[in-house]
Amino acid sequence: MALDHLSRRLITLALEEDLGPGDVTAALLDPDATGRAIILAKSPLVVAGIEAFVEAYHQVDPTVEVAFEVRDGDRAAPGTSMGTVHGLARSLLTGERTALNLLQRLSGVATMARRAQDAVAGTKAKVVDTRKTTPGMRSLEKAAVRAGGAYNHRMGLYDGLLVKDNHVRAAGGVKPAIEAARKSAHHLLKVECEVTTLAEVEDALSARAEVILLDNMDTPTMKAAVELIAGRALVEASGNVTLERLPEIAATGVDLISMGALTHSAKAADISLEWDA
């Protein structure tokens, strides 16, 4: 994945946050000393964030050589050598924490995404992410979701029209909210509407929503909604989605399951940089 300008800016800010006016520990090392370190997986994980790791090191020192033996989307077992970094010792140690933070965070998201999509195997359901991402890291985290085998929802407020509960309340109901959305949407933009009851499902269907989001419904109501929609719109389930509940939700026949936990609750993967003496 080629990094976008926002991701590069984020990495620059992360380095500025860590280094401030300069790394005082650099004085511990001979300025001409070189070294090599191994990128080591210490927990079972799905790899993501390689480009961000490389970018962090190259912003510190463009001469640092980074060689990965894995690709984004690969699985790595504990003890796996994922790759190496080689260059000036000062540069390797200065960039270590920021580069690892990115790799650990994004591999954690990818690992969570893989577990989630595996949980709905054998059904038509796709697990998708949300906008509940770490500020500034959306592009990176959504790429990590894809690396893990799950799918992306809209990137932001500019590329997908989702009528949410507060829009419905402000507009005075599901139908008026969808009608207002249609007036502003161009012909290539689908309208999705969030609903919480079967009556609202009926309203969304009559207003010709292309996607209907079933929010925080219990499983029997969700199944009834899928039967009511009967293929007239794509169906997305959302709210109270956990890894344990995913198979149950997928069995109702929904097309999409949005899961904020893919990004907001993913545990960072355990990865270290081990100096190669």
Image (spheres, rainbow, N blue to C red):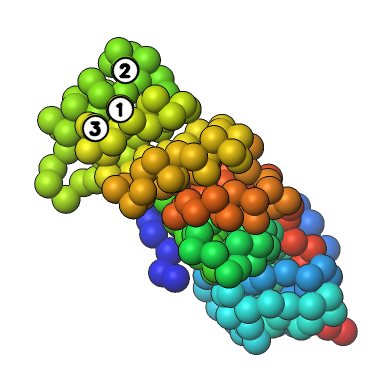
Q: Position of residue 32 (x, y in %)?
A: 71, 78
Q: Is residue 90 above or below residue 218?
A: below
Can residue 134 be seen here? The reply is: no
Residue corresponding to mark 2: 173
**Which residue: 74% across, 61% down?**
269
Q: Of residues 274 and 176, which is closer to you in this image?
A: 176
**Which residue: 19% across, 25% down?**
180
Type of residue at label 3?
Ser
In terms of secondary structure, where does tag 2 sit?
A: loop
Quarter-of-image position of residue 186? top left
Q: CA distance from mark 1 to mark 2?
A: 9 Å
Q: Is residue 117 found left or right of 231 in the rendered image?
A: right
Q: Residues within 10 Å of mark 2 (few under 14, many from 20)?
A: some
- In what quadrant of the picture does the C terminus appear? bottom right
Quarter-of-image position of residue 26? bottom right
Do callouts 1 and 2 mark residues in contact (Cβ within 8 Å)?
Answer: yes
Q: Of residues 124 and 230, which is closer to you in this image?
A: 230
In terms of secondary structure, where does tag 3 sit?
A: helix
Q: Residues within 10 Å of mark 3 (few under 14, many from 20)?
A: few
Residue corresponding to mark 1: 203
Q: Position of residue 203 (x, y in %)?
A: 30, 27
The answer to which of marks 3 and 2 sits earlier in the sequence is 2
Q: CA distance from mark 3 to mark 1?
A: 5 Å
Do callouts 3 and 1 mark residues in contact (Cβ within 8 Å)?
Answer: yes
Do callouts 3 and 2 mark residues in contact (Cβ within 8 Å)?
Answer: no
Type of residue at label 1?
Asp
The answer to which of marks 1 and 2 sits earlier in the sequence is 2
Residue corresponding to mark 3: 206
**Which residue: 35% across, 21% down?**
168
Q: CA distance from mark 3 to mark 2?
A: 13 Å
Q: Is residue 170 above or below residue 39?
A: above
Can residue 215 be seen here? The reply is: yes
